[in-house]
Image (spheres, rainbow, N blue to C red):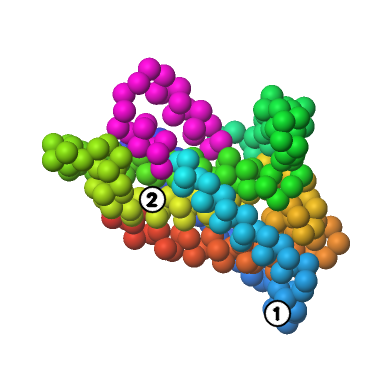
Amino acid sequence: MQDVPLLISRILTHGSTIHGSSQVIALLVRTPWHSLPDQLTSPEVWQALKLSLLCATAATAVSLVIGVPLAWLLARVEFPGRGLVRALVTLPLVLPPVVGGVALLMALGRNGIVGQWLDAWFGITLPFTTTGVVIAEAFVAMPFLVISVEGTLRAADPRYEEAAATLGASRFTAFRRVTLPLIAPGIAAGAVLAWARALGEFGATITFAGNFPGRTQTMPLAVYLALQSDPEAAIALSLVLLAVSVAVLAGLRDRWMTAS
């Protein structure tokens, strides 16, 4: 007799696949194809699309600058509290995005722990700005990059770095000349995942940055707003996000299949 947990897992997986396919089919059926070009070229949609691409790219750059060294630290260096640091880094994966937005407000808002000093000393206000959008998106997207890069680092042979060190290379030189080329595929995959996650971010963005057209209104926020007044525009924007998601999954499929 087949193992019951395995059978339940297969049923749930099959059911989720059917459910996801039905949602995609429903979206495609309801898409206003005759007016789709006009919808996608309207000033409001183009504005949200342009802002989304800009902020997602900036958030991915921030994630790369912070996430790659952090992933190397977690994979290569033994230090007290490493498990706690890893838990904090990956916390946004399970934390509701709205809660993440509230946490950002408490930390970086004008009355926040850090934000009050930024405002008093430098006159910098982060919430409800385009920079706030980038911060919110980087907050939720960076764990995808860190997990991907850390996994690649753990799979890479550390003997190459040790050989570089015996030849007189500093730790930074070994990282730049040896480690980075070795883990480049993992960095690329993590960056793509982080970019896609940032592009689709909604909860933390609307909580921390608001929904101001031209300044903080990204595509997911525009979909939410358009759904109340212009459903056809909402469907058109949703179709763009769907196309991006499919492209990301298709681009990374070979890497996942090889890894498995």
- Label 1: which secondary element: helix
**Residue drawn 56% across and 36% down?**
92
Between 201 and 78, the one lying in front of the other is: 78
**Residue drawn 74% across and 47% down?**
129
Quarter assignment of residue 140 = top right
Q: Main secondary structure of the magenta part?
A: helix
Between 5 and 181, the one lying in front of the other is: 181
Q: Amino acid at mark 1?
A: Pro
In the drawing, does residue 176 fall left or right of residue 95?
A: left
Which residue, as the protein is rendered here, is positioned at the far front? 121
Query: Which quarter of the rendered picture does the N terminus lie within?
Result: top left
Q: Mark 2 — residue?
A: 187
Between 113 and 15, the one lying in front of the other is: 113
Which residue, as the protein is rendered here, is positioned at the far right? 229
Q: Amino acid at mark 2?
A: Ile
Please report contact status of discs 1 and 2: CB closer than 8 Å, yes or no: no
Which residue, as the protein is rendered here, is positioned at the far top? 80
In the drawing, does residue 180 fall left or right of residue 229?
A: left
Work out whether residue 19 can be spotted.
Answer: no
Task: Indicate whether 240 appears above or below 56.
Answer: below
Single out the mark in the foreground, 1 or 2.
Answer: 2
In the drawing, does residue 157 fall left or right of residue 254?
A: left
Position of residue 160 measured from the top left corner of the image (x, y, whole percent): 17, 43
Q: Which residues are magenta?
A: 68-93
Quarter assignment of residue 46 = bottom right
Look at the image and say whether residue 106 sits in the magenta stretch: no
In the drawing, does residue 163 fall left or right of residue 129?
A: left
Q: Earlier in the sequence, mark 1 or mark 2?
A: 1
Look at the image and say whether residue 78 sits in the magenta stretch: yes
Position of residue 136 measured from the top left corner of the image (x, y, whole percent): 64, 43
**Residue drawn 31% across and 24% down?**
78
Q: Mark 1 — residue?
A: 37
